[in-house]
Image (cartoon, rainbow, N blue to C red):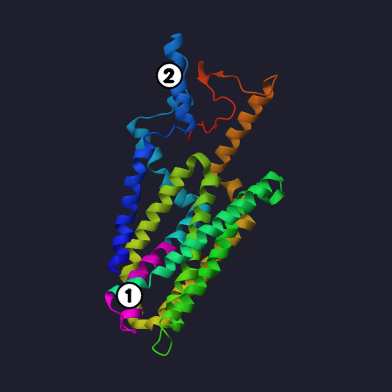
Amino acid sequence: MAIYLAATIFGPVLVAGLAWPFLLFMPETYAPVILKRRAQKLRKETGDASIVAPIELEKTDIGHIVTVVLTRPIRMICFEPLVLCSCIYTSYAYGIFYTFFQAYPIIYTGIYDFNAGEEGLTFLPIGIGAVIAAGIYLCWDSTLRRAQARNTPWARSEEMRRLPLACLAGPLFVLSLFWAGWTARKSVPWIVPTLAGIPFGIGYLCLFMALLNYLVDAYEIFAASAMAASSTSRSTFSAVLPFAARPMYGKLGVPWACSLLGFLSLIMCAIPFVFIKYGTKLRAKSKFCQHLAQKKREEAAKREREPDGKMPEDVETGGRRTSRPEAGDNENNVKKD
């Protein structure tokens, strides 16, 4: 386990260090910032101080940041069912993963008499499952792209683009917990419960990729706040839940402790299926999604008013001209909140 923990801690640091030099040479891709730079260039060239980008019209005072921006993740958890349920599910999965750091020594050291090094190697199947999950994701993404190219109806749905992976992940997650719990005994070879890590790794990674991408697709410019809500809740669960692991496994025993986690996972399996069925209605009632839809309608109406169907490069906004993106730019330049 010590080897696994070291890899978990220092692996991302090493990767981030290697990737950092490349970031310095990457072009800016965030549309509002591109518009801001364009507006600054036009002001310098023309001397017209009225040319501004939409992002420059937003409030940046400390009061707005504290009362609106920093509180948005909390408001999304409290009033957005999609965010709340996604946070609960991913946080629970994250918490179970960290619970295994307490449960695996109980299983493999306590039952199979492994030493610390051998017990650490039992985490490898989880990594194998994660690699398989990455392949599944790439296959699904390829299928989705082909469906979008054919303009297949299901490929236009926010829910169907992402959530089928979560529907696959849930049962695998449940299977792995019951598998590990009820095969971890002296009469069963150690490899049998160890292999339960493969479906866990598949389910774990597929669940995260599906639900987090779904939140990004659903909330667009508010995705950062949704991700902040998810990250905060995950970190909280991963810090708190492992404290219950040893008392729970000591009181219930390995089979029923894993079964308890499995039954809770079984209940949460319903979340992506509910999203697929009712997600459109939930987004229609969401204040944030309604705001996005309104802005999209306004952008479409402005295009229709132009003779050639295109937006002008500069439009009047409250008496001030606002630089617009050229064709091909991502127009994520709506006012937030």
Secondary structure of the residue carrying tag 1 is: helix
- At 48% from the left and 44% from the top, the residue drawn is 223
State whether residue 52 is above or below residue 176: above
Residue 30 position in % (x across, y down): 47, 33
Relative to residue 250, is residue 163 drawn left or right? right
Left-right relation of 283 to 177? right
Q: Residue 64 appears at what percent x and percent y?
A: 38, 34
Which residue is more in the foreground, 174 or 184? 184
| Picture quarter with the N terminus | bottom left
Residue in the image at 33% along x and 68% along y: 242
> In this view of the protein, can residue 144 be seen by the observer?
yes
Q: Is residue 45 left or right of residue 245?
A: right
How crowded is the residue under tag 1: few (<14 C-alpha within 10 Å), some, or many (20+)? many
- For this orientation, the residue located farthest to the bottom is 187
Name the amino acid, label 2: Gln
The picture quadrant where one finds residue 24 is: top left
Q: Residue at x 63, y 51 (%)?
A: 144
State left or right for residue 105 relative to residue 42.
left
Q: Which residue is mark 2?
A: 40
- Identify the residue shown where x is 40% and y is 78%: 257
Residue type at mark 1: give it. Answer: Glu
> Residue 98: which quarter of the image?
bottom left
Is tag 1's residue or tag 2's residue first in the polypeptide sequence?
2
Q: Residue furthest top?
A: 47
**Magenta region: which residues?**
92-116
Q: Which residue is mark 1?
A: 119
Nearer to us of marks 1 and 2 is 1
